């Protein structure tokens, strides 16, 4: 498995070796020893899956203390633009983001550790998206940042008028209005 460092510390891409022939393909989608060697020890406790159509944007989400959550995410089918934003209070990369294309064809996975807000936009007709989480969903800790905050400046690769949001995501605060997370960097 190839591990790729992104522009933000601790946000990693995992790119599996795919073995294919006329019958199809095979790859290891997760391997604990490789993951922990690069991202540190984690205990994954919950897997989530979503199916979304073109233009759906989910995010930017995170969980506040004491229920911070890291996610290993991938697109099983379709193509998404996956985004992580550093929201660790005092971090030298506060408010900076990385955006990576994850797809059913490139099989890449992105590790978004606690301390980063996460979101994705569907670029294909549909996308089947999988999350491996290291903490349970805690509604009382659920939080987010505005997807279109100019201070963050994400190019979602979808015209703003074509973006489809939940009511919750449409009403998230700007980065300057959140407290941020007290986590190491």
Image (tube, rainbow, N blue to C red):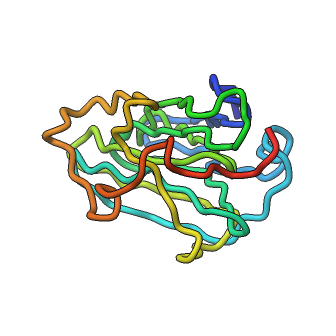
The quadrant the N terminus occupies is top right
User: Which residue is at the far top?
Assistant: 7
The quadrant the C terminus occupies is top right
Between 80 and 58, which is closer to the camera in this rendering?
A: 58
> Residue 19, image x and y in percent?
58, 36
Residue located at (45% from left, 64% from top): 49
Residue located at (84% from left, 47% from top): 40
Between 120 and 76, which is closer to the camera in this rendering?
A: 120
> Residue 168, image x and y in percent?
33, 64
What is the tally of numbered marks visible in this picture?
Answer: 0
> Residue 171, image x and y in percent?
32, 58
Between 139 and 35, which is closer to the camera in this rendering?
A: 139
Instruction: Locate residue 94 relative to residue 128 in the image: left or right.
Output: right
Instruction: Locate residue 144 relative to residue 19 in the image: left or right.
Output: left
Q: Is residue 82 above or below residue 99?
A: below
Q: Is residue 130 above or below residue 11?
A: below
> Residue 54, image x and y in percent?
21, 46
Q: Is residue 164 above or below residue 138?
A: above
User: Which residue is at the far front?
Assistant: 177
Residue located at (21% from left, 51% from top): 164
Residue located at (60% from left, 62% from top): 63
Q: Name the quadrant containing residue 120.
A: top left
User: Which residue is at the far left?
Assistant: 161
């Amino acid at each position: 498995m190839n591990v790729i460092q992104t522009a933000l510390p601790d946000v990693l891409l995992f790119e599996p070796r795919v073995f294919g022939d006329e019958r199809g393909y095979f790859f290891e989608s997760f391997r604990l020893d490789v993951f922990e060697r690069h991202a540190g020890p984690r205990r994954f406790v919950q897997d989530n899956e979503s199916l979304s159509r073109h233009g759906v944007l989910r995010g930017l989400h995170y969980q506040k203390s004491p229920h911070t959550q890291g996610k290993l995410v991938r697109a099983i089918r379709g193509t998404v633009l996956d985004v992580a934003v550093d929201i660790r209070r005092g971090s030298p990369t506060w408010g900076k983001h990385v955006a990576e294309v994850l797809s059913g064809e490139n099989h890449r996975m992105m590790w978004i550790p606690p301390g980063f807000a996460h979101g994705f936009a569907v670029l294909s007709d549909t996308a089947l998206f999988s999350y491996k989480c290291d903490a349970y969903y805690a509604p009382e800790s659920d939080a987010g940042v505005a997807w279109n905050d100019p201070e963050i400046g994400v190019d979602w690769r979808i015209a703003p008028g074509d973006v489809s949001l939940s009511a919750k995501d449409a009403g998230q605060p700007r980065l300057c209005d959140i407290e941020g997370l007290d986590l190491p960097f």
